[in-house]
């Protein structure tokens, strides 16, 4: 949801909008999560043109490298409009990104955000996503002031479901034939993690 006149001052005061004053970098044992920039376009294209990365994500496969740069620019601009927070995941001590992650939407009125991401197949099975998701969840609840964080996933994506369950996400919904993708209708599930009372 965009920041708009429909959001009351009372609701806005519940979120910490100071996180948008400058891009919030996060660090884990192995990762630096930093702002996505145009130079990340080629790495984004590499991931989004890979059929394995896109297997469970209902979006078109990127066909032109410029599309990766365009998405990087769009994501950076959306941060400064306070609409999303998109991080580039970089192995500490190295320069190239190996994934992207963040809050794809921020619902100001309901203090809820949607988390999503992708990881280069060369780094699958190394618990990289676990580090990134853990850092982002902590940031969302402790710094931004969210009350709940949701993820929309294909129920067939067992790796993503296991990751969400590890972090205490609860399955809130299962929509049958929700998305048309790869020439067929597929189900979609919504998992949510709630702020601890």
Image (cartoon, rainbow, N blue to C red):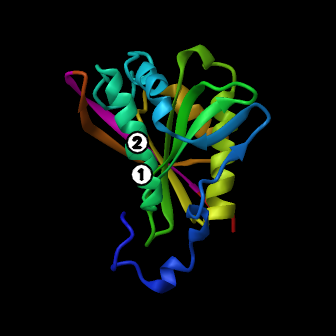
Residue located at (32% from left, 32% from top): 58
Q: Provide residue 108's location: percent of width, then percent of height.
A: 45, 69
From the viewer's perspective, tell me whether residue 66 is left or right of residue 156: left
**Residue placed furthest toward the left:** 183
Residue located at (40% from left, 24% from top): 48
From the viewer's perspective, tell me whether residue 47 is left or right of residue 177: right
Q: Is 195 or 100 nearer to us in this picture?
A: 100
Q: Is 159 or 78 nearer to us in this picture?
A: 78
Per the rendering, the mark at residue 77 is: 1
Residue located at (42% from left, 45% from top): 75
Q: Secondary structure at mark 2?
A: helix
**Residue placed furthest toward the right:** 29
Q: Quadrant of residue 47?
A: top left
How many badges with numbers are in the image?
2
134 versus 91 height, above or below? below
Q: Residues within 10 Å of mark 1 (few under 14, many from 20)?
A: some
Q: Provide residue 137's location: percent of width, then percent of height.
A: 64, 51
State the extent of the magenta-drawn residues as a range. 183-193
42 versus 115 height, above or below? above
Quadrant the N terminus occupies = bottom left
Q: Which residue is mark 2?
A: 73
From the viewer's perspective, tell me whether residue 44 is left or right of residue 147: left
Per the rendering, the mark at residue 168 is: none
Q: Are discs 1 and 2 less than 8 Å apart at CB?
A: yes
Residue located at (58% from left, 40% from top): 164
Q: Residues within 10 Å of mark 2 (few under 14, many from 20)?
A: some
From the viewer's perspective, tell me whether residue 130 is left or right of residue 1: right
170 versus 43 height, above or below? below
Quadrant the C terminus occupies = bottom right
């Amino acid at each position: 949801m965009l920041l708009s006149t429909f959001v009351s001052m009372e609701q806005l005061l519940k979120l910490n909008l100071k996180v948008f004053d400058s891009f919030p970098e996060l660090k884990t044992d192995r990762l630096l999560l930093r702002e996505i920039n145009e130079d990340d376009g080629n790495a984004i294209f590499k991931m989004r043109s890979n059929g394995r990365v896109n297997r469970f994500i209902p979006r078109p496969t990127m066909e032109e490298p410029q599309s990766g740069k365009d998405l990087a620019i769009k994501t950076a601009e959306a941060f400064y409009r306070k609409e999303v927070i998109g991080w580039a995941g970089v192995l500490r001590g190295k320069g190239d990104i190996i994934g992207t992650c963040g809050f794809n939407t921020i619902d100001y009125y309901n203090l809820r955000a949607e988390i999503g991401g992708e990881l280069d197949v060369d780094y699958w099975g190394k618990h990289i996503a676990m580090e990134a998701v853990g850092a982002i969840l902590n940031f969302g609840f402790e710094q931004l002031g969210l009350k709940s964080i949701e993820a929309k996933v294909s129920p067939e994506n067992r790796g993503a479901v296991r990751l969400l369950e590890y972090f205490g996400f609860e399955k809130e919904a299962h929509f049958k034939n929700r998305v048309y993708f790869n020439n067929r209708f597929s189900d979609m599930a919504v998992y949510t993690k709630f702020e601890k009372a």
